[in-house]
Image (spheres, rainbow, N blue to C red):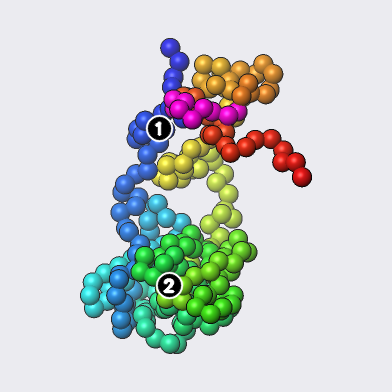
Amino acid sequence: MAKRIISQARGHGSGTYRVRRAAFKYRMKYPSHLEGKGRVAKLINSPGHTAPIAKINYDKGVFFIPAFRKMNEGQEINFDSKEVKDGDIMKLGDIPIKTNIYCIESSPGDGGVFIKAGGTSASISKIVGEEIYVMMPSKKEKAFNKNCRAVIGIIAGEGRLEKPFVKAGRRYYLMKTKGKLWPRTSPIKVNVIDHPFGSGRGKNPKRKTAKRNAPPGRRVGHLRPRRTGRKKR
């Protein structure tokens, strides 16, 4: 009897295709109210994140953010200062143009959504009325509310992709910690019982568009696209 195909196994949600909860036990988020100063209590290595995590102590408790480049334990961080310094958490409306920032809130008070991967940063590009335009790492501008908060600086962990894996085993365990599908086999290259596109007879699948109510084993290819084919001008 054949095994279930990967799309079925992932939909079932077994431990093989599920992210380890222990890898994401630190929730990175700003508190709702930040005033005064905080101090970096500890730098933590989290297997589920691409950058070190900083544990910040302040008057009303503790919170976690991605560490910035050259952060030290015991370093002071300002929350409402007008002086721009790496690690300070400020509103976008108070940050000068061309300043590197990360961990940007999508809407005021949501705790930081954008730019949280190791070695990345964005920069303030222009101010138009009540909106602040930020140049993202993709080289596209995005508008934000001036009251959204961000951290000054560049996230630590730059250059992590420059070191080769060397062995397939190392990459296997890295992808496993993040619940990623790896290695990915081309559907046409597998057996016909393992995938709807399987078998090497004629390298083109019979149909790439799955029906809306198709079961998990048949929901492969284009999942109810609005249109297919080349767009005519």
Q: Nearer the viewer, mark 2 or mark 1?
A: 2
In the depicted view, which residue is nearer to us: 20 or 148? 148
State left or right for residue 228 relative to residue 92: right
Q: Is residue 155 magenta?
A: no
Q: Nearer the viewer, residue 65 or 140?
A: 140
Residue assigned mark 1 = 11
Helix, strand or loop at label 2? It is loop
Q: Which mark is residue 148?
A: 2
Q: Residue furthest front?
A: 233
Q: Who's the residue at 47% across and 26% down the image?
A: 214
Q: Front-most of 6 and 232?
A: 232
Q: Residue at x 47, y 62 (%)?
A: 114
Lower sequence index among marks 2 and 1: 1
Percent coordinates x, y for residue 23 in the rendering? 35, 50
Q: Is residue 214 magenta?
A: yes
Look at the image and give the residue range highlighted in magenta: 208-216
Q: Magenta segment, principal secondary structure? A: loop
Residue 77 appears in which quarter of the rendering? Answer: bottom left
Q: Residue furthest right?
A: 233
Which residue is pictured at 39% across the width and 70% down the height? 108
Instruction: Tell which residue pokes out farthest to the top in this image.
Output: 1
Mark 1 residue type: Gly
The local secondary structure at tag 1 comes to: helix
Residue 204 in the image: state x and y as whole percent: 67, 24
Quadrant including the N terminus: top left
Tell me if residue 156 can be seen. no
Q: Position of residue 111 (x, y in %)?
A: 36, 66
> Image height check: is 16 above or below 24?
above
Discs 2, 1 touching: Cβ within 8 Å? no
